[in-house]
Amino acid sequence: MPETNEHNFDVAVIGGGPAGILAAVRAGQLGKKVVLLERNETLGSKLLLTGGARCNLTNATFDKKELAQQYGKEGYFLLHALSIFGAEETIKFFNKNGVKTKTEKENKVYCATDKANDVLKALIYLLRNNEVSVINHAKVKEIKKQKNKISKIVLENNKEITAKNYIIATGGKSHPATGSTGDGYKFAEILGHKIEKLRPGLVPIKIREEWVRNAQGLSLPDAKLDVYLDQKKNFTASGEIMFTHFGLSGPAILSISERVGSLLEKGKVKIALDLNSNLTPEALEKIVQTYFEKNVKKTLKNCLTEILPSKLIPVIIELSKTEAAKKANQVTKEERQRLVAVIKKLEMTVEELLGFDQAMITVGGVSLKEIDAKTMKSKIIDNLYFAGEVINLHGPTGGYNLQACWSTGYLAGQSAA
């Protein structure tokens, strides 16, 4: 990476994650003198974790409005950035720069090699090719301003960086081991920006019941979930879930975690799992009865193997208050109905969401009301721009959050240049 002793730039970008790198690349492409400041030893630590280290680059939703809707009520803010650099532009950009892509189920777009490092290599090459100065181990101690403009950045080693324009792309607080320590929020707040409440997002859920631990490792690819607040159904979701040593994870769980977290502030939350959502309780009971009639000499435990995952059979039997050693022909109608009731509504009590160290993203951040959606420019500081997770903007799993980083990073870099 080219380095410089003359700390006087057109654009200074704080944060070497996906948004910061792309912002620096874009400003460099426009012929500006750019510096990228990264607190870690290397760039893109968090990028390497995305998509299970396979890098879920984006979601192949090419209709800009439809894509914006995935970000909830804040999606309107992203619409202009998506019109400049949306999912289609992202795929073309990476393809052009040597990263082949593939689209999998739910329109998830991955690096074709399944290696996030190949995406990072392409971005680092672009930084070099566009003569962006990269300073690693660059921990920002202070951002100084005069009136409504930033005058300079002071690093922890007391080096000073000056630029015409500055971009804060420091990421959130999730996975702090990758360098996402929430510094950007502090900088923004000191500069006069409002920070919307920060919470872990796309995060696993801790369950109170001990039996969940016995199901550890079990994955259900198309589960149906009902979420209850104080025994009243609040919403329904579906998708892949996974049982863990602490409770529940998987794409469907991560996607509902924010809503579950909000409900927890209001009362007692339960998640009810329907283990056979294709059948009504009556139809399922008939099938169970048929299995029992065909296997009269088998124990109850062995009869249920064709209906349920083996790890859940002891749980279902225990919760339905039925004896596992009973022969199939000894099971009463009432016991059979209790079994079906638990299969159709396997309840779990939510204890809490796991913290930022397990979260994929941060919910909350710099208020959208104080950022110009057309440029990513601060409405408070004349020469400041924002990009990426530091902004109060987030989407579900499936490449949406990386797309928000690419879109806001590209636009911020272009505007700052």
Image (spheres, rainbow, N blue to C red):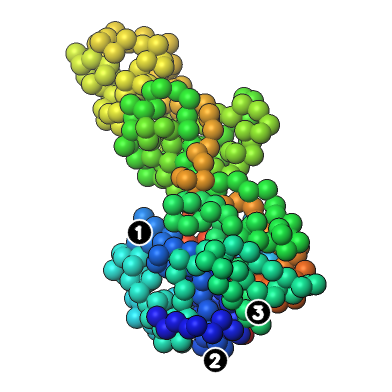
Q: Are marks 2 and 3 in contact (CB under 8 Å)?
A: no
Residue 191 horizontal side relative to residue 292, left or right: right
Q: Residue at x 65, y 28 (%)?
A: 267
* Residue sitting farthest toward the left: 297
Q: Earlier in the sequence, mark 1 or mark 2?
A: 2
The answer to whether one can see residue 392 in this image is: no
Residue that numbered label 1 is attached to: 53
Q: Nearer the viewer, residue 294 or 323?
A: 323
Q: Residues within 10 Å of mark 3 (few under 14, many from 20)?
A: many
Q: Where residue 1 sits: x, y (%)?
A: 40, 80
Q: Earlier in the sequence, mark 2 or mark 3?
A: 2
Residue 155 horizontal side relative to residue 214, left or right: right
Name which residue type carries label 2: Gly
Residue 31 is labelled as: 2
Q: Which of the 4 image quadrants contains residue 41?
A: bottom left
Name which residue type carries label 1: Ala
Residue 287 horizontal side relative to residue 272, left or right: left
Q: Where residue 62 sits: x, y (%)?
A: 53, 72
Q: Could you give the CA–CA distance between mark 1 and mark 2, rounded to whole angstroms?
A: 33 Å
Q: Earlier in the sequence, mark 1 or mark 3?
A: 1
Residue that numbered label 3 is attached to: 165
Circle nearer the viewer, 1 or 3: 3
Name which residue type carries label 3: Asn
